[in-house]
Amino acid sequence: MARLNYLSSEARTRSLPIPHDVKEAVQFLREGVGRKVTMADLVAHCGVAERTLQKHFRAFMAISPLEYWRRLRLAAAREQLLTGTSVISITAVAACFGFNHFGRFSQQYRRCFGETPSATLRRRRTVELARTGRIHEEGAEDSGTFTVAARLLREKPTIAILPCQTSAAEPEHRFFGECLAEGIGTALTRARSLHVMVPKSSQSVRSFDLKRLRRELSAQYFLVGSIIQADKRIRLIVRLIEATGAQIWGDSYDGEAGDLLRIQDRVTEGVVRAILPAIRGAEIERARRKPPEDLDAYDLTLRALPFMSAANPSASRQALDLLNRALEIAPDYAFSTALAGLCHAALAALNGTSSPIEEKQRALVLAERAGMLDPDDSQVLIARCCVHTIAGQFDVAGSLIGRALAIDPSSAWAWQRSGWVKTFSGEPETGLKHFRRAIHLDPLSPSHANRLVGLGCAHFDAGRYDQAAFWMLQALREKPSIAWINRTLSVSYARLGERLAASDSLNALQHYCPDLTIGQVMAALPFPRDFMERVAEGLDDLGLRP
C-alpha cells in the first residue's frame, strides 16, 4: 500500500485560464503599436479596475501592461529600421511608434537589442548597398508614415515553388509541371511554417536564373525540378536550393508516363516530408552563423531548438535562456512563448528541478499565453500539447494535437506528440502507430531518440518488456545524455530477470540524479496508474530510496 501513496499524494497541476481583461488588453495593445495609449485608455477599454488589470497582467504576462506595450513598440521600430521600404530617419521612426524623447528611445532600444538605432540602420544600409549597389541618401526627406506589421519579427522563410523545366516539344509535361508546383505549394501552405510562393507563369521561370529569380521573387529557398521521359518512363528530378545557390536537398522519382496522377501524389508526399526538416535545419544553421547583434526573436528561437532536442535538463535551461531573450525582444511571439513553456515542463518531466509542481504551473501559464497570442499556429498547438501532456491533462492535450494534425497532417512532430498522448492515456497500440508514423515522416529528426523512447514506453505499458528494453537501449545508444530513460529501462531489465543489467541501469540513473527518489520519479511521469505501480515496485526492489 505504501507504493500506492506515491500516486495518491501527487498534486495535480491545474490549468488556469487567462482572464478576459488580459486578453482584451493584449489585443488592444497589439493593435495600438502605432498610436498613443495610456493606462487610463487601457482600463477604460477592458472595463476593470487598474489594480485588477495590473495584477492579472503581471501574473499571466510577467510584466506590466505598459512595459509590454513599450516592448511591442520597440520591436516595431526595430523591424521598420531593418526592413522598411521607405526612406528612413530614426527620429521619424521613433515618433511614429510613440517615442517622443529621442534620447530615451535610443537608451531603451540599446538595452533591449544591444545596439543603438543608428547602428541598426547602418547595417541595413550596408546590406542594401551590397545587394543592389544603391543606398538611400542620408538626410533625404522622409514620408513620415510607416506600415506597422500585424505580427512583429515573424521571419518565416519564403520558398518559391517553380514549375518543372521541360522541353518545348512536350507541352503536356509543362502543364504537369505547373500542376505539380501548385499541389506542392498547397500542401506546404497547410503547415504554416513557411511563406509559399507559386509563380503563375511558367514562361518567367523556364530557365533557372537564380540571380534574377532572387531579385524578382525575394525568396530564401527555391524548389526546382526537371522532367525527363524515355519511351514510356518518366523521371522527375527535384532540388531544394538556397538563395545563395547551395543545394540542401534533392531526390528523383520514376514512374509510368501514363500514370502522372500517381507520380504527382508520390512526389508531393516525398517533397513535403523532406523539405520542411531540410529548411528548418538550414534556418538553424543560418541563425547559428549570425553575429549576436543581428539576432532577432526568430533567430534566438531557432538557436534554442537544438538544445530542446537534446532532451536533458542542462540543455533545457540553455534553451530557456535563449527563449527568454527572444521574449524580451518580442513579448508577443507565440512560438517562443510556447517553447518556453515546454522547457519548464521538460525540467519537471526529466527530474531536472526540485520544484516540479511549480515548473508545471509556469509551463501551463506560458502555454495559455501562447494560445492567446496565436491560437491557430500548428507549431504552437504542438508545443502546448506537450505542456498539457506532462501536466497530466490528456483531454486538453488530445484536443490540441487533434487541431494541429488537422492543420498539418504531414507534421512528424505532431504525430510524435500524439504518440505520447496516446501512450500516457493508456492506449499503447495506438501510440506505437503514431510514433512509427512520425519516424516514417522524418527519419533523420534530431528528436528520433525521443520517438524510440516512446516506442519503448508503449511496449512497457503493454507488458512487452523485451521490446521495451530493446527500444529504450536503442534510444540511449543514439543519445547517451538522456540517462533519465533508466527510470523505466532498469525496471524492464528487472522484469526480464536480468538483474545485472538492471543494477547497471539504476547506477546510471543515480549518477544522472544522485538524490533521486521513487516519489520524485512518480511525480515526474504522467503514465497510467498500472504503469506507475510497476515502475514504483521495480525501483523499490532495485533499492532506490522511497
Image (cartoon, helix red, strand yellow):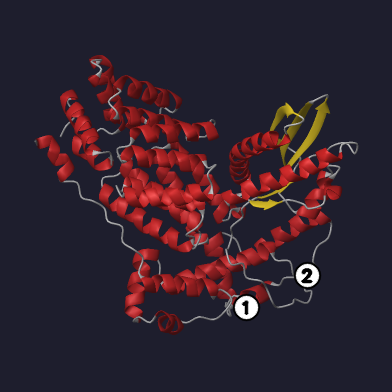
Q: Residues within 10 Å of mark 2 (few under 14, many from 20)?
A: few
Q: Is residue 302 above or below residue 26?
A: above
Give coordinates of residue 70: x percent, y percent.
Answer: 50, 71
- Residue under numbered circle 2: 138
Looking at the rendered structure, the kind of residue marked 2 is Glu
Q: Is residue 255 left or right of residue 60?
A: right
**For this rendering, which residue is in front, 9 or 461?**
461
Give coordinates of residue 458: x percent, y percent.
Answer: 34, 31
**For this rendering, which residue is in front, 241 or 70?**
241
Q: Quadrant of the N terminus?
A: top left
- Residue under numbered circle 1: 95
Q: Residue at x 37, y 49 (%)?
A: 397
Looking at the rendered structure, the kind of residue marked 1 is Ala
Q: Is residue 44 visible?
A: yes
Q: CA distance from mark 1 to mark 2?
A: 18 Å
Q: Is residue 16 above or below residue 393?
A: below
In the displayed image of the protein, which residue is found farthest to the left?
Answer: 1
**For this rendering, which residue is in front, 27 or 69?**
27
